[in-house]
């Protein structure tokens, strides 16, 4: 489905103002910078989140496929594509296109042809991308006609029409005659004293010679110009006027014929304009998907699992927000602190408290922006295992929205926004409110905040809010469906840590900060006396809980570090054992080879001695006994036991898969490493991409196997012989296309190249004959940039010269 087609399903458009508040346009501008041509960039900037689960999942899957495609097939891209839609539509209205524009149309169609055929061959591996590429129109007739008429520089070729070839031939003859006559005039000894220089130049499209002004009339002719000093007159000799006229007339005929040819070519483009426009739009869609993949790599992002609204007790909407190590994509990745936002199954309203500049607003923006990005099909800067519900709409009121023009205060501005949100939101919306109840009297603001939360909770709307009102801490603790959260504050450094803690409210740090900054103890104690005992006890309890939580977090971190060290030692041991086993097998193989060589030498010696004894007429009994002994030795050698090294269970090929194992993804034919392991599937790191695969699709790979494969690949790249996959039947080393038209030959050529590639042929010969050269040119145009073609060249004279093209194929192994 086209990324901008979500409006067609119900006319629903997600809230644009909230998208701007959450800075989605900045993300789309960055996304556009990863596109390859203007149509893709335009589509990226107009991309909008989809409110539909199936479409959001399709977008995510397309991005996942594109990341794998670009990581494993780095030659695929949008090179040569241009937004030629205006040109195609102009041609449809009868406008004659310039040669450069026609070349852009051909390059765009060639790129579309390459992508369509390449992704078609890879459809089993990349089904979503292949389905989109299927919509590309090749328009082979337009491609071939433009290639026939124009050369690579945009010049109309002589072969474009018979009349043009005749005109240009006559033009060359007329030019040679004109130049010859002028050369005779300027090199005539009698004329030398009249000429300023012995050269021929042009003025106003006519060839002239420079005559000294004082000798005007000595060489009869027409004056066309004079020098700035007046010392030189540029005249057209009368003897060359007719020749000049003939040459100029032929020039005009050439211009008229070229215009006629370009007009006919433009009419052909206009006839195919709707297919060309459709192709550019499809290329833009693929370019956008590729841009999402490149942006995901730049963000070190991961695919997020998008889910629908689950069944939950009323009024819970059944939403899911489970973001692990989430980073705001617009903040510096070197300094941004990842946050975990994990709302449990019983909660759908989260109230975040904490000090100013502590990261509350960033936490809200992170959740809101990542939700919109996920529904745009982008991978997110989160840890694997993150999950999100696809919301029908996202509403946000963040920051100071005070309007000077409308003379609204900060409180009034926020309240106006909140009223609009309450009118539009429903149980399938996500609502994000910053500093709820701020900007007015604290008591009234707190009461209003609680009333607003009551309404949102009762209506079952997933909500995230920040607040300074301490009363909301108790409210969130007691209200079903609501949960507290807070941002950490380090009293040692008097600075926020920007970590979000779900489940605990923020504690008041005013007295502690004042004490750390040096406020007199007497004032601190007096302030404590003015705080109610219940607040002090609650604050002390929160302090104790935070300290306990921090100690637990550190203990978990130490345990994780110890586990990682143990796993590292285990992997080291496994590698050593594998190395020992490999060495053992190599030593056994070497010993067998040496024994076999010695045995063969002994047999040769027996044969030599047998021949000598037979020649001497001696009995062969002794030799037979020796031969029997040799056979006995051979039998003993064959029955030598193969000693085994005791290997741990987890080194055996049939063992259960574990975290960190190297595995072979059989459906994709690539190697990866297990990063997360479930009961039925696993998350596998392939290059820079992570993907989920069923366990029965994974085969364990030892480190030695992986190294052997890499060495084999390296030998293959350097030209050494390696074992190749099974080949199909060879189609032969030659393809004879003589007698076929261009339209008939190109499909035949494609089928032949596919068969030759699958058969593992290193090169083939394409016989197209010489003729007019049109068939040769069309074939070489198709070979240029073909994904299966490494290089091509004309045949040597023994092979047929220009009538043959020799094609080197890429290795199929």
Image (cartoon, grey):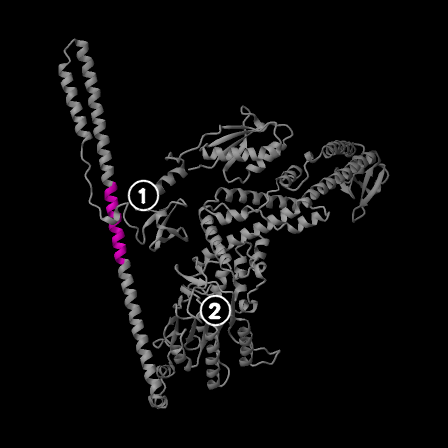
Q: CA distance from mark 2 to mark 1?
A: 47 Å
**Quadrant of residue 480 within the rendered picture:** bottom left
Q: Pick the quarter of the image with the N terminus.
A: bottom right
**Left or right: 498 with respect to 612?**
right
Apparent side of residue 405 relative to residue 653 in the rendered image (left or right):
right
The residue identified by callout 1 is: 705
Residue count near mark 1 (Cα–Cα under 10 Å), binned few <14, some 14–19, many ≥20: some
| Residue sticking out furthest to the top | 617
Where residue 408 sits: x, y (%)? 58, 80
Q: Nearer the viewer, residue 563 or 10?
A: 10
Q: Is 193 placed above or below 341 here?
A: above
> Residue drawn 19% across and 26% down?
634
State the residue position of label 2.
365
Mark with earlier residue (2, 1): 2
444 over 792 or under it: above or below: below
**Is 352 placed left or right of 597 in the picture?**
right
Q: Position of residue 678 (x, y in %)?
A: 34, 55
Looking at the rendering, the stretch of residues picked out in magenta corresponds to 565-582
Query: What is the magenta segment's predominant secondary structure?
Result: helix
Q: Do labels 2 and 1 touch, CB within 8 Å?
A: no
269 sits left or right of 71 in the view: right
Position of the C terminus, as image quadrant, is top left
* Closest to the observer, 662 or 445: 445
Judged from the image, the secondary structure of the residue bearing numbered disc 2 is helix
x 51%, y 43%: residue: 120
Q: Quadrant of residue 188?
A: top right
In this rendering, does residue 619 appear at all?
Answer: yes
Q: Position of residue 94 (x, y in %)?
A: 73, 47
Estimate the x, y position of residue 613 in percent, counting from the top left.
17, 12
Q: Which mark is residue 154?
A: none
Magenta segment: does it hold 571?
yes
Element type at marker 1?
Answer: helix
């Amino acid at each position: 489905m086209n990324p901008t087609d979500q409006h067609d399903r119900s006319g629903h458009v997600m809230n644009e103002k909230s998208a701007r508040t959450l800075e989605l346009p900045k993300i789309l501008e960055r996304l556009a910078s990863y596109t390859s041509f203007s149509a893709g960039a335009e589509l990226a900037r107009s991309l909008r989140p989809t409110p539909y689960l199936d479409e959001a999942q399709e977008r995510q899957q397309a991005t996942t496929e594109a990341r794998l495609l670009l990581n494993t097939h780095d030659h695929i891209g949008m090179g040569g594509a241009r937004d030629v839609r205006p040109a195609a539509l102009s041609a449809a209205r009868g406008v004659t296109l310039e040669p450069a524009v026609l070349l852009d149309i051909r390059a765009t169609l060639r790129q579309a042809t390459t992508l369509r055929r390449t992704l078609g061959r890879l459809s089993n591996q990349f089904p979503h991308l292949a389905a989109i590429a299927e919509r590309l129109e090749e328009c082979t007739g337009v491609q071939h006609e433009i290639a026939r008429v124009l050369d690579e520089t945009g010049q109309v070729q002589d072969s474009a029409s018979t009349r043009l070839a005749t005109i240009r031939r006559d033009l060359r003859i007329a030019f040679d005659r004109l130049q010859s006559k002028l050369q005779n005039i300027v090199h005539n000894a009698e004329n030398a004293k009249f000429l300023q220089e012995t050269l021929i130049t042009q003025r106003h499209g006519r060839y002239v010679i420079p005559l000294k002004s004082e000798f005007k009339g000595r060489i009869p002719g027409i004056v066309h110009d004079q020098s700035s000093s007046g010392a030189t007159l540029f005249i057209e000799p009368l003897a060359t006027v007719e020749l000049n006229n003939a040459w100029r007339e032929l020039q005009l005929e050439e211009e008229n014929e070229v215009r006629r040819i370009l007009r006919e070519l433009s009419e052909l483009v206009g006839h195919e304009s709707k297919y060309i426009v459709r192709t550019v739009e499809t290329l833009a869609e693929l370019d956008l998907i590729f841009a999402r993949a490149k942006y995901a790599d730049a963000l070190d992002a991961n695919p997020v699992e998008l889910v629908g609204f689950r069944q939950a007790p009323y009024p819970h909407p059944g939403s899911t927000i489970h973001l692990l190590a989430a980073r705001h994509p617009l903040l510096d990745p070197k300094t941004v602190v990842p946050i975990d936002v994990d709302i449990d199954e019983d909660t759908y309203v989260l109230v975040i408290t904490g000090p100013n500049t502590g990261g509350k607003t960033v936490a809200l923006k992170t959740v809101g922006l990542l939700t919109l990005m996920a529904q745009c099909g982008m991978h997110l800067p989160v840890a694997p295992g993150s999950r999100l519900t696809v919301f029908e709409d996202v509403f946000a009121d963040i920051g100071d929205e005070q309007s000077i023009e409308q003379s609204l205060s900060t409180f009034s501005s926020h309240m106006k926004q909140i009223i609009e949100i309450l009118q539009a939101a429903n149980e399938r919306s996500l609502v994000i409110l910053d500093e709820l109840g701020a900007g007015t009297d604290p008591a009234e603001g707190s009461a209003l905040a609680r009333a607003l939360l009551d309404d949102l909770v009762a209506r079952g709307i997933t909500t995230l809010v920040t607040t300074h009102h301490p009363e909301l801490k108790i409210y969130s603790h007691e209200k079903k469906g609501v949960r507290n959260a807070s941002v950490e504050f380090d009293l040692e450094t008097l600075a926020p840590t920007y970590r979000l803690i779900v489940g605990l409210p923020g504690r008041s740090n005013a007295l502690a900060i004042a004490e750390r900054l040096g406020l007199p103890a007497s004032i601190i104690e007096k302030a404590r006396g003015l705080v109610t005992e219940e607040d002090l006890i609650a604050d002390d309890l929160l302090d104790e809980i935070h300290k306990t939580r921090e100690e637990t977090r550190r203990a978990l971190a130490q345990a994780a570090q110890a586990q990682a060290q143990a796993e590292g030692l285990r992997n080291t041991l496994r590698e050593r054992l594998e190395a020992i086993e490999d060495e053992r097998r190599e030593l056994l193989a070497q010993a067998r080879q040496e024994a076999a060589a010695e045995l063969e030498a002994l047999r040769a010696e027996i044969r030599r001695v047998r021949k000598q004894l037979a020649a001497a007429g001696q009995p062969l009994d002794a030799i037979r006994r020796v031969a029997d002994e040799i056979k006995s030795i051979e039998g003993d050698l064959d029955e030598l036991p193969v000693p085994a090294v005791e290997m741990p269970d987890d080194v055996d090929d049939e063992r259960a898969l574990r975290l960190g194992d190297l595995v072979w993804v059989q459906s994709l034919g690539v190697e990866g490493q297990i990063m997360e392991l479930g009961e039925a599937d696993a998350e596998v790191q392939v290059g820079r991409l992570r993907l989920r695969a069923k366990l029965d699709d994974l085969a364990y790979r030892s480190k030695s196997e992986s190294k052997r494969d890499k060495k084999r690949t390296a030998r293959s790249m350097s030209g050494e012989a390696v074992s190749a996959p099974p080949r199909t039947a060879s189609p032969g080393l030659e393809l004879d296309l003589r007698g076929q038209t261009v339209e008939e030959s190109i499909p035949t050529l494609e089928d032949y190249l596919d068969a030759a590639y699958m058969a593992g042929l290193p090169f083939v010969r394409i016989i197209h004959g010489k003729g007019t050269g049109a068939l040769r040119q069309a074939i070489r145009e198709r070979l240029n940039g073909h994904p299966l073609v490494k290089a091509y060249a004309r045949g040597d004279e023994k092979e047929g010269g220009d009538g043959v093209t020799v094609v080197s194929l890429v290795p199929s192994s």
